[in-house]
Image: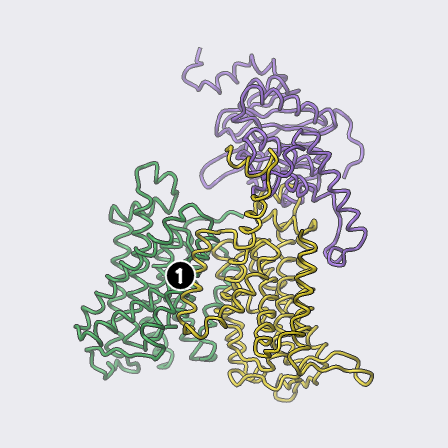
Chain colours: A yellow, B green, C purple
Amino acid sequence: MSRWFTVAWVAFLFSIPIWMTDLYFLHILITTGIFTIAAISLNLLLGYAGQLSLGHVAFFGIGAYTSALVSLGFDLEISDSYTLVFDPQPVWLAFVSGIFVSGLFGWFIGKIAFKVRGAYFVIVTISFAEVVRLISLNWIDLTEGPMALNNIPPFTLGVPGLWEQTFYQKIPNYYLVLVITIIAYIIVRRLVLSRAGRAMIALRENEALASSVGIDVTRYLILATIVASAIAGAAGGLYTHYIRIVDPDIFLFIYTVTMVIMVVTGGKGSLAGPVVGGIIFGILPELLREVASPEVQWIIYGVFMIAIVFFLPKGIVPALTAWWADRFKSDGHGSKAVRDSR
Amino acid sequence: MAEFLQHCLNALILGGTYALLGIGLTLIFGIMKVVNFTHGELYTFGAYMVFFFVMVLGVNFFVGIAAAMILGIVLGALIEFVLLRPLRGASIDTTMLVMIGAWIALQNLEQFTWSGIAKSIDHPFPVEPLVLGPVSVSWIRIFVFLFALTLIAGTYFLINRTKLGKAMRATFQDRDTAALMGVNINHICTATFALGSSLAAAAGALLGPVFIVMPTMGDGAALKAFAIVILGGLGSIIGATVGGFILALVEELGAGYISSGYRDAMGFGLIIIILVYKPTGLFALKERIG
Amino acid sequence: MNTTATDSAPILSIENMAVHFGGLVAVSGLNFVVHEKKIVSLIGPNGAGKTTAFNVITGFLKPTEGTVRHRGTSLNGLRPNEIAERGVVRTFQKTSVFDGSTVYDNVLTGLHLRGKSRSWEILLNLSRVRTEERRLRETATEILDLVGLLGRSRELASDLPYGEQRLLEVAVALSAEPSLLLLDEPVSGMNPSETENFMEFVSRIRDRGTTILLVEHDMRMVMGVSDRVIVLNQGTVIAEGTPTEIQHNPEVIRAYLGRGSADA
């Protein structure tokens, strides 16, 4: 079933701009897609490797700022006599550097943060994001602080001089985001279904046992962090060249929380979970906009997340998958039969 | 030099309330192993309760503070009973996620109830600061400092000299053994969460009149509380107290001499450095494994 | 890694191991040797230091003193996964499986060391990655067949009955291709017939070339399967020999019954 379902679903997604005339809704889909990519990346770290990394928005923001700065160019006074002048680079190069720098930070923070575990780890990750936010707020020479970086160039693909395509309009941006989402999904899927992915899941389920069969726990934790932060950086890059303005508020903890809610309600540790969660929490605010103020919406989301943890702890997608499987299980060795017999 | 002394004095005053925040969280964190994201909201709650009683109902200032603390106990106990007790035995991730949900719901409830406009609270102390040679300090802050010290001493006494405290310490050391020895773990958990929450509410109640009251004030407070817990080591009241003062000092001096914009970052930078070199914190009572 | 190991060469040697926890002495002056392709049991009253020794050997605990050697090379300071790479794998006293995963995935995970794919190769889905994955999956099926759990492949490890979970644990440890397998109380909680099956299973593993070091309280298992028995008490070796020799050793009897009663 799943392969045809996936093909149909992807074909549907590709078809949307053809029949969807409401450009505002397309805009919603684009921002939803960007956040979904971030959720897919967080899922690798939170869902598969089982790490309570609550600083994830930092990588999203670092990717956004890096891509913005590289594409805009900047001047940095290193000392009284020397100013570093960085010329604007093509957007695709900026985008790639955003991914690279995010991944680098991921590696760096991973090396530090994984010296501690559990609750301490949570705090370190939150602190990291806060520090990055404060730096972006205060290092005005580089980031313009609260005045924001604006006039960021839109995405451009191509070879200068030969052929160039600039993505000013919504439709090309939609396809760009869709393609990157699919790539991110495939990356995580390949990783997770491989030997490396098994190592990550193993260290989540039983770290001591994983270690005893030869799994280098730290190495796989760092691998998960690098891949997750790089993908988040890509999401940040897409954000920056679509919205074309970026300010320190991008590092607010509330965005990490949004990603966490997407992953947890959708189903952490499942591939489709963050996609479902991303769609729900990308579109829901729009649907509720007429009837509920932002505060009330957030109260609903908070309660919703609590409800999911209490009643569907694995998330929506795994719950649906289990329900679907139970409906069709009829042989004597079915998992349901085994569960009932305990 | 006078500037330095003033910073130290400010740090002393601020440190007391920071210590309250830290002690509350380290107790909850240490005894219940819960990443309590609602801690900041109890801080906010305490401030809003004082606002409500003093500014809206016109009640006496000191009664308002007491009321805020008592309501903090009630809210804490409620949160524990409704959200945490059913999850007893669940992994730390699960409780953390529930606490995040609760934090969001609570903060937005505050915003919904009181609106986002900052509020100020009148207090009965003289506005003219007390001048002691080169330094000066306002009377309200002296009150805050003394009250905080009293609460810290009271908590220390509670944990170390009462039966309830003994039970809490036993649960912290080894929950299973404590249960076998007759300690009612459920009661202890509720009491711990209620106590920790009321200390956070007290901190909010004390600082509300000093600064201003906003729905988001709890976020910064919560992060500082986490920083203090790491600094002082999980489960250590003395550690949290010392940690609170150290954080206040680092912030004051950092803001004064380096940059005020990075004030809040000082604490975090400090934590990250400490964790890299001494992962158990400065005063940890239990060694970590692994 | 040493290539030739004669049947009488030591595969493991513990030299002067001491472990102090603050004021508590868990192990002190511990010396013993395990030879290739033998089943050696480590027995002793509770608190004698057996699991502590296991934890040190496999890198989960740092000794206060002493050296652990595997085929002559010191294991000191190595992390558990590095020690596993060298061929020393353990099971745990408390049942340890990957509880959220299926039986099949448990074993597949245990085969980690038998794979070599790098992350970038995985991301590019190179054909050598796919080939290796196929090979690993075949091996997993073989191992499950060997231990008799093939029919349970798709079930969650946590859903298995107790005896089969313990069997799965050993299967996972075996997947890592150890030359030395350390089993920590593998038959505790098993009924007599499960224990019989397990004893036979352990002998088969030894016959296929893996050395086994066993911590056990079940005397029938110890006496029935061991080539050699080492007795620990209060952190040090008090006797060693064949099962029969140990059974009649007065020191051993005294250690188990306590100082008061064996005074003659």
The residue shown at (46%, 74%) is A289
Instruction: Please state if B83 lies on the left or on the right of C158 as rendered.
Output: left
Instruction: Please state if C206 lies on the left or on the right of B246 as rendered.
Output: right
* Image vertical order of residue C224 relative to residue B289, above or below: above
**Of the residues shown, which amino acid type is indicated by label 1?**
Ala
The chain letter under disc 1 is B
What residue did someone put label 1 on?
B102
Q: Position of residue B255 (x, y in %)?
A: 43, 78
Q: Position of residue B207 (x, y in %)?
A: 30, 72
* Mark 1 nearby-residue class (10 Å; few <14, some 14–19, many ≥20): many
Q: Residue furthest right?
A: A162
Quarter location, residue A299? bottom left
Q: Residue furthest front?
A: A19
The residue shown at (80%, 80%) is A159
Nearer the observer, C123 or B136: C123
As helix, strand or loop, the secondary structure at mark 1 comes to: helix
Q: State the quadrant of the N terminus of chain B.
A: bottom left
* Image vertical order of residue A252 relative to residue B179, above or below: below
Q: Position of residue C188 (x, y in %)?
A: 53, 27
Q: Position of residue C194 (x, y in %)?
A: 58, 23
Nearer the observer, A226 or B130: A226
